[in-house]
Amino acid sequence: MTKLKGLRNAIVSFVVLILIWQLIYSVSRFSPALFPSPKRVALALVETSADGSLLRGVVASLSRFAVGYVSSAILAVTTGLFLGLLPRAFQFVNPIVQVLRPISPMAWAPFIVLWFGIGDVPAIFVVFIATFFPVLLSTVSAVVKIDPVYFKVARNFGVRQPQIMWKIILPAAFPQIASGIHLALGTAWVFLAAGEMNGVQSGLGYMIVDARNNFRTDTLLATIVVIGVIGLTLDGVLGTLEKALMKSWGDVKE
């Protein structure tokens, strides 16, 4: 019932948004070439789907995103778990992290292009950087906040590594780690499209640049809509996986 209600609310929200869009289009003095109507954007979506360009763009973007996001999340969680268990070591690492964290991933893109050339690597690297620091810091914070009583009980029962990691640390820290991973998902997806606008010949970001260069604002807006829908879908899939893992570790909250 809750899921059906959420779906209904989402449909109503999108219908209202489209109606507002149509209303603004009707009263606007902008040329349709500059501000396309919902119908024209829908036709552009059908056109790009029919010629296969949209599917190729989606596959290319998702492939880059999967490589950058998954590899970064795994490395960040692994590093964060050990740094959380070694707070003194993290005191030396943290200043470096705090200096690098605010730097936009796009700032590194020129260096990556110079080092590795144009292609998939710059976009993947942008996703990697956008994911790494939020997940790393959330993981370290989660491990540091674990109640020491858990470790005392484990020692009393003779539990040792790696069982402590799998049976105590990960289940206790996972809710906060999951929050960091979830937060990084949206950020990384945003930066992927930006990364694909520089030196890449495929993907959704490239489609935006190509549509702009050809003055196809309908195709541009259609691509933006697809990016938003995919981002919403990825968020929902990740949320489902998080709930499944929490349930397997004894947290059955809905």
Image (spheres, rainbow, N blue to C red):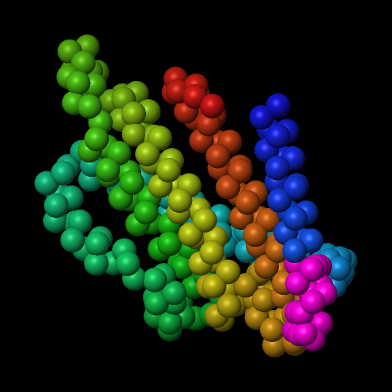
Q: Residue at x 53, y 73 (%)?
A: 195
Q: Which residue is farthest front?
A: 27
Query: Is there any visible trace of residue 74 in the rendered image?
Result: no
Query: Is 182 situated above or below 191?
Result: above
Comparing 141 with 164, the one in front is 141
Comparing 140 with 78, the one in front is 140
Q: Quadrant of the C terminus?
A: top right
Q: Residue at x 22, y 11 (%)?
A: 157
Residue 245 placed where, x, y %?
A: 49, 30
Query: Is 211 situated above or below 134?
Result: below
Q: Residue at x 65, y 49 (%)?
A: 233
Residue 178 lies in magenta, yes or no? no
Q: Quadrant of the N terminus?
A: top right
Residue 37 lies in magenta, yes or no? yes
Residue 111 placed where, x, y %?
A: 39, 80
Residue 162 placed where, x, y %?
A: 29, 28
Q: Which residue is farthest top?
A: 157
Query: Is 79 situated above or below 29?
Result: above
Magenta stretch: give its range.
21-38
Q: Is residue 102 left or right of residue 144?
A: right
Q: Is residue 219 left or right of residue 3?
A: right
Residue 85 placed where, x, y %?
A: 20, 38
Comparing 54 with 124, the one in front is 54
Answer with the quarter of the image where residue 28 lies.
bottom right
Q: Residue at x 47, y 28 (%)?
A: 246
Answer with the quarter of the image where residue 202 lies.
bottom right
Q: Which residue is farthest left?
A: 88
